[in-house]
Image: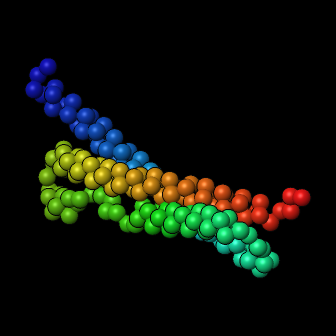
Amino acid sequence: MSKMGDQNDSPDGLDFVFKMGQQKIADQIQVFDALDTKVGIVLGLVVVSIAEILGFLILAVAEGVESSHRFSACSGALFVAGLASTTLSALFGILALSPRGFALGLKFPEMVKRANRSPDQLRLMFLDDLLKSCVSNGDALDAKQRWSKVAVFFAALSLAFYSITSGLLFASLVNWG
């Protein structure tokens, strides 16, 4: 192919890569939003679980339930472990929701200053900018995913502790004989 043919093929390639870069940024934004939604649900679950278990415990205390010291120590330890897990889940969830620098055009001011260049030169500048934005966003998404997974793990752990605690307390309230 002649040099002239290579230059004619270049704008189509630039347009394709440019559109793919824009799609990559759009996909990253969707993942960001989805993770924020999931973490918001986990945080809501944490708040509801705390309200439920505290309500149950207050009800049990109001009824004047007598239980053995061994049972009280066991259920107390499980409750404290659940509360610690819930607190950690909330903290990691908030960390996952914390604002991160999401890159959308790092060099845009520079590109505006150079608007007198050819469209192909501007596309190449913008492609470089898209690449840097995608890499930067990928790092932010990795951190958000990591903190989200930790928050979900601690939420599940707290629910397990609360379930065991509730089961033990319920068993102590039921007259089996």
Residue 71's quadrant in the figure?
bottom right
Front-most of residues 25 and 15: 25
Res 61 seen here = yes
Determine whether 19 is above or below 168 in the image: above
Q: Position of residue 48 (x, y in %)?
A: 64, 67
- Image quarter (top left, top right, bottom left or bottom right) of the N terminus: top left
Extreme-left residue of the structure: 3
Res 40 seen here = no
Front-most of residues 135 and 70: 70
- Image quarter (top left, top right, bottom left or bottom right) of the C terminus: bottom right
Extreme-front residue of the structure: 69
> Does residue 117 appear left or right of residue 79 in this picture?
left
> Which residue is drawn at the image coordinates 31% and 44% (left, top)?
21
Q: Position of residue 23 (x, y in %)?
A: 38, 45
> Does residue 51 appear left or right of residue 123 in this picture?
right
> Does residue 128 appear left or right of residue 148 in this picture?
left
Q: Position of residue 89 (x, y in %)?
A: 49, 62
> Which residue is drawn at the image coordinates 30% and 37% (left, top)?
16
> Which residue is drawn at the image coordinates 77% and 74% (left, top)?
65
> Which residue is drawn at the image coordinates 62% and 67% (left, top)?
73
